[in-house]
Image: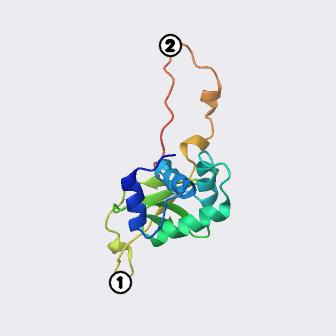
Amino acid sequence: MIMDPQYQQAWQNFGVERATRQNTAIREALAAAGRPLSPAEVLDEARRHVAALGLATVYRNLKALVDAGEIQVVTLPGEAPRYEPARREHHHHFRCDVCQRVFDVHQCPGDLAGLAPPGFSVSRHEITLYGRCSDCQPAANARTRKTPAAAPAKARPHGHSH
């Protein structure tokens, strides 16, 4: 894996002395996922490039990336933290009850200040939706039976993007 000099300089600007194959694989795993990842998911993805990568190295690099402001922690109530690239745009999350993966939800209901008790002020909000992701939707009975040749197959709805 060859490091682009600008990428190397950006990494050094964040206070990391040098970009190693391990932290490059971790950063690329987070960037490519398109959704928040748990440390175990980061490890699985990063091991595609660095087979000998260990979980302790993942945790050390995640902490360094959070401290550098390059990634942010996604905290869901009662769950271990997940990580995603730091972003400026406001978004929410969807957690699949079956596979426990978390996805970004880019839609927002908007101003929720009216939900606060009288006299309270809302400074921010976080919404987590729970359900089944498109991969974990149970197959409808009709989908398990063969459909007539003349009938077009129904596309699976994409129930979320996280």
Quarter of the image holding residue 105? Answer: bottom left
- 85 horizontally vs 99: left or right: left
In the visual, does 9 lie left or right of 35?
left
For the point 59% across and 46% down, the residue is 49
Q: Earlier in the sequence, mark 2 or mark 1?
A: 1
Say the numbered circle drawn on residue 29.
none
Query: Is 141 on the left or on the right of 64, as rendered?
Result: right
- Dividing the picture into quadrants, the one containing residue 127 is bottom left
CA gap, disc 2 to disc 1? Answer: 59 Å
- Residue underneath mark 1: 118
The residue that appears at 50% across and 49% down in the rendered structure is 33
Residue under pointer 2 = 150
Q: Is 138 above or below relative to 53?
A: above
Q: Secondary structure at mark 1?
A: loop
Please tell me which residue is depicted at 59% across the width and 51% down the height of the picture.
46
Name the residue nearer the viewer: 81 or 23. 23
